Image (cartoon, helix red, strand yellow):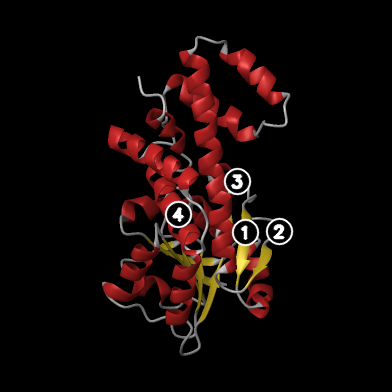
Amino acid sequence: MRTAWLGTGLLGLPMAEQLCESEHDVVVWNRTPDKARALVERGARLASTPQDAVQDAEVVFLMLSDAPAIESVLFQDTPVDLSERTVVQMGTIASDESRTLAERVQTEGRRYVEAPVLGSIPQARARELIVMVGATRADFDRLHALLAVFGPEPRYVGPVGSAAALKLALNQLIASLTAAFGYSLGLVRREGLDVEMFMDILRKSALYAPTFDKKLPKMLSRDYGSPNFPTQHMLKDVRLILRQGGALGLATGALDGVAQILERAVQRGHALADYSALYEGIDAP
């Protein structure tokens, strides 16, 4: 299938690599071209503009940082002609943002599908991402084999907006669980308790989540390099979740605290570090 891929950030790059390895025709564009050049070695063509990328594409994948970035790339700088194409939005945006984007795209034979993913770089490289799809059932069925390039069992969630909302619900757990673990770890360390004893008890309890062991070494060493997901992106997502939850009438106090922790970590210079750096917003040295 002829595809265009817009956005080759930390997750976008390995996902686009899977398209190339599956022998799809891939044209790639990124605002910083050097970040996309590795795909040329895998058979992709590097486009100079978004319009150049989508020129001959049947499906246009978006893996951009947020809704304003999508707006800029598709509609503001130089509007992209999406006629007779299917746009597949795979980044994390709010459900109302996704529905608004769908309304703008779904004209003149265009189709729109949201397909956010759960997982990070290792899962993308192993084709083990969880792909959640918001679309018509017909569009889901039509694109199922293509989306299965990224994960073995794409899940149909419902109409546009539903998969975006589900992704935010899951990302809320990522942020809140990591912050809760960081706080407990900080308490243990400040009291001079044995960290491994704490972890041994935690692992044997119903409180345990595997992400705790994944983030523990980074928090102990305060080395947050080689991020799978940066702190600034987690903060962006938490702000989206707060806005959406507030609009739905949910109490947001607990998540407000997580946002403040992330903001402190960013202010201390960890914007591009792994999001486990939120520990620096809890237990700074």
**Mark 3 or mark 1, earlier in chain:** 3
Q: CA distance from mark 2 to mark 1?
A: 7 Å
- Camera-side residue of 154 and 260: 260
Amino acid type at image mark 4: Leu
**The C terminus is located in which quarter?**
top left
Q: Is residue 159 visible?
A: yes
**Which residue has dot 1 on it?**
131
Amino acid type at image mark 1: Val
Percent x, y of residue 24: 56, 66
**Mark 1 or mark 4, earlier in chain:** 1
Q: CA distance from mark 4 to mark 3?
A: 27 Å
Q: Residue at x 68, y 19 (%)?
A: 201
Q: Residue at x 41, y 60 (%)?
A: 64
Q: CA distance from mark 3 to mark 1?
A: 11 Å
Q: CA distance from mark 2 to mark 3?
A: 13 Å
Asked whether the residues under the numbered discs 3 and 1 touch, taking CB atoms below 8 Å apart as contact, a structural biologist would say: no
For label 3, the crowd category at 10 Å Cα-Cα, with few meaning under 14, some 14 to 19 and many 20 or more, is some
For label 1, the crowd category at 10 Å Cα-Cα, with few meaning under 14, some 14 to 19 and many 20 or more, is many
Amino acid type at image mark 2: Glu
**Which residue has dot 3 on it?**
123
- Camera-side residue of 177 and 8: 177
**Which residue has dot 4 on it?**
242
**Mark 4 or mark 2, earlier in chain:** 2
Asked whether the residues under the numbered discs 2 and 1 touch, taking CB atoms below 8 Å apart as contact, a structural biologist would say: yes
Q: CA distance from mark 1 to mark 4?
A: 23 Å
